[in-house]
Image: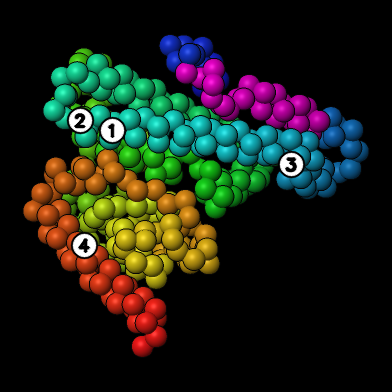
Amino acid sequence: MKFGETFSEYLHGDQEWFLDKCSHVEYKQLKKVLKRCQTCRLIQGSSDTRPEDENSELSHRHCESCPLCDQMFFTELEKEASEIAGCFSSKARRLLHLHVSNRYVWRLRHCFTNDQLTLIQKGQVLIEYITMNAIAIRKILKKYDKVHCSVNGRNFKTKMRAERIELLQSPWLIELGAFYMNSSKIDDGESGEFFRKFSCDFSGTSPIMTLALTDSVKLEYNLTCAVCLDTVFNPCALSCGHLFCKGCACSAASVLLFEGPKAADPKSKCPICREVGVYANSVHLAELDLLLKNRCKEYWKERLNAERAEMVKQSKQYWESRTRITLGY
């Protein structure tokens, strides 16, 4: 079955109640734009009376620069990708915050079993939503390059990463993967099968989280902090997508632990990609932190004690300096 038909069935399937309030890739509409562009190209080629070799060169130049696609295709696709990324982040944040809230009332856990199952089902819909739209974007960009004999579609994917609207690079996808691994004890048939798509290996030289979203989409995330070169502790993701320990991110941004990464100067740069302005919208990965706590208990306790000691030290130095400034000595 062609992807266009598969995507249409998905949009009008069991998830339709969810998609009513969410943006999605207008796959068929974008394909129509490419079809019209291909028709224009054929008309252009048939109306030209130059020799065949010159015709080929003219056709190639025409394919690389198509005003219709440049003005409509990429503008529309960028808008859709941005809206999809925003919708996914917003709904994932809300869902995971609900899960954290339920976790803090563990004494009443039996009262929240149905709520937990509901959260798991909603998380599954969210992952399918982001995956299907990511595949749709990948397919349509590949089609664009085929029609235009260009690499503009590939370049657009690079632009999406730079502007942080690449759908499968969202830190909330990592959080949802950790959420499923933390909830793996709840196995109820279809949802239990879905749990097996997510795994984490802390036994190798580099800790790796694997999300097997589909047969063709398999994501691997290295959970090593690029600053301390150890498994991330109390992890946070900067808006550029890179993961760090909270303490390492604060150190790189020259802010104190109790202030947090969001207190960083807007000109502070990511230690990896050197992009500025990536601390303000950093995300604390609470589910990933819980996964590390459950899977690497001794390591987690050791890092927790070290972080607490460092926070006490920084707080003491901070208030001593404030006292000296206030008293004038």
Q: Earlier in the sequence, mark 2 or mark 4?
A: 2
* Badge 1 element: helix
Which label belongs to residue 105? 2
* Distance CA(mark 3)–CA(mark 4): 50 Å
Which label belongs to residue 194? none
- Residue 40 relative to residue 78: left or right: right
Q: Earlier in the sequence, mark 3 or mark 4?
A: 3
Q: Residues within 10 Å of mark 2 (few under 14, many from 20)?
A: few
Which of pointers 3 and 2 indicates the residue nearer the eye? 2
Tell me the residue at 22%/67% (across/down).
312
- Could you say where residue 207 lies in the image, as x and y percent from the top left? 22, 51
Which of pointers 2 and 4 indicates the residue nearer the eye? 2
Tell me the residue at 39%/48% (across/down).
283
Label 1–label 2 contact, CB within 8 A: yes
Amino acid type, residue under disc 2 in the picture: Val
Which label belongs to residue 101? 1
- Could you say where residue 304 lies in the image, as x and y percent from the top left? 17, 57
Label 3–label 1 contact, CB within 8 A: no
Tell me the residue at 35%/26% (across/down).
123
Q: Which residues are magenta?
A: 18-42
Tell me the residue at 48%/39% (across/down).
167
Amino acid type, residue under disc 1 in the picture: Ser
Q: Earlier in the sequence, mark 3 or mark 1?
A: 3
The residue wearing badge 3 is: 70
Label 3–label 4 contact, CB within 8 A: no
